[in-house]
Image (cartoon, rainbow, N blue to C red):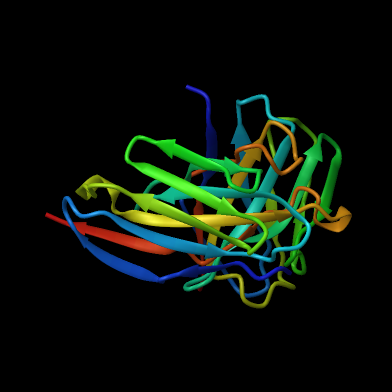
């Protein structure tokens, strides 16, 4: 089955700790995205990658970092600099990043702060 | 960050009734508008990508229209069924260089269809 997987489903972060959320796709898509959802708000773009070894900041990149070493993988690290990390995180991919291509979403990771 | 508004925030529909709701977006520098359906405990799923003023798209009982000059899109559900219960998201993308590839999502319209 082709699709996007995210792990873990739930993640707990302690004060001052960095945590990494995994996102893998087997759709052979060039572009990948990370979004954050907070209650009552639309999905907000954290980072996106148009191609391997390249990524750009989205609207709320502060306190996050990413890498894109492989086409199928786009992990997101929530650093200790992110002061309000509790949220639902969605990863998505599309064939290209032009904006007229459908994005395919993973099941999400809920991050909670202990 | 561009302003994408969806209304109403939520609505309740009786099974068999038809309904519609709105997505408003900036009317300048339009490039594309996406609609997604997000059912509870599932991933958002694409419904439509609309690119031309006057576009009308249909998928089963769900259809959408687009007016880029005035900056709005309507999503219609005909003969609502309980399986149509979901949050419907719209996302706008501008044609400006600094917006390339960046979808701006609305907060969604939550639809609950009761038998």
Spot the residue most to the bottom. A83
Q: Quadrant of residue A27?
A: top right
Q: Nearer the viewer, residue B89 or A71?
A: B89
Going 67% across and 24% down the picture, which residue do you hit?
A28
Q: Is residue B94 above or below residue A104?
A: below
Count the marks: how many? 0
Quadrant of image for the N terminus of chain B: bottom right
Asked if residue A33 lies left or right of residue A40, the reply is: right
B66 or B47, which lies in front?
A: B66
Identify the residue at image location x=41%, y=64%.
Answer: B109
Can the viewer see residue B43? Answer: no
Residue B8, percent from left and from top: 40, 71
Q: Is residue A10 left or right of residue A28?
A: left
Coordinates of residue B56 in the picture (x, y in percent) = 51, 42
Question: Which quadrant, please, contains the C terminus of chain B?
Answer: bottom left
Q: Is residue B109 above or below residue B18?
A: below
On screen, residue A39 above or below B69: below
Q: Is residue A85 found left or right of B17 in the rendered image? A: right
Residue A52 x, y percent position in the rendering: 82, 34
């Amino acid at each position: 089955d082709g699709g996007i997987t995210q792990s873990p489903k739930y993640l707990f972060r302690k004060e001052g700790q960095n945590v990494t959320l995994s996102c893998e796709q087997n759709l052979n898509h060039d572009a990948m995205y990370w979004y954050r959802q907070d209650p009552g708000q639309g999905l907000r773009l954290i980072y996106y990658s148009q191609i391997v070894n390249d990524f750009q900041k989205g609207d709320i990149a502060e306190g996050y970092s990413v890498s894109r070493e492989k086409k199928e993988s786009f992990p997101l690290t929530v650093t200790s600099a992110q002061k309000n990390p509790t949220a639902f995180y969605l990863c998505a991919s599309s064939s290209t990043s032009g904006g007229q291509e459908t994005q395919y979403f993973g099941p999400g990771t809920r991050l909670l702060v202990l | 960050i561009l302003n994408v508004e969806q209304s109403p925030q939520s609505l309740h529909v009786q099974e068999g009734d038809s309904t519609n709701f709105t997505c408003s977006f900036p009317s300048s520098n339009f490039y594309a508008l996406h609609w997604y359906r997000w059912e509870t405990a599932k991933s958002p799923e694409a419904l439509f990508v609309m690119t031309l003023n006057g576009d009308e798209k249909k998928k089963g009982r769900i259809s959408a229209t687009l007016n880029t000059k005035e900056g709005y899109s309507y999503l219609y559900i005909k003969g609502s069924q309980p399986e149509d219960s979901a949050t419907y998201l719209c996302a706008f993308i501008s044609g400006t260089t600094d917006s390339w590839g960046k979808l701006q999502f609305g907060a969604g319209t939550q639809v609950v269809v009761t038998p």
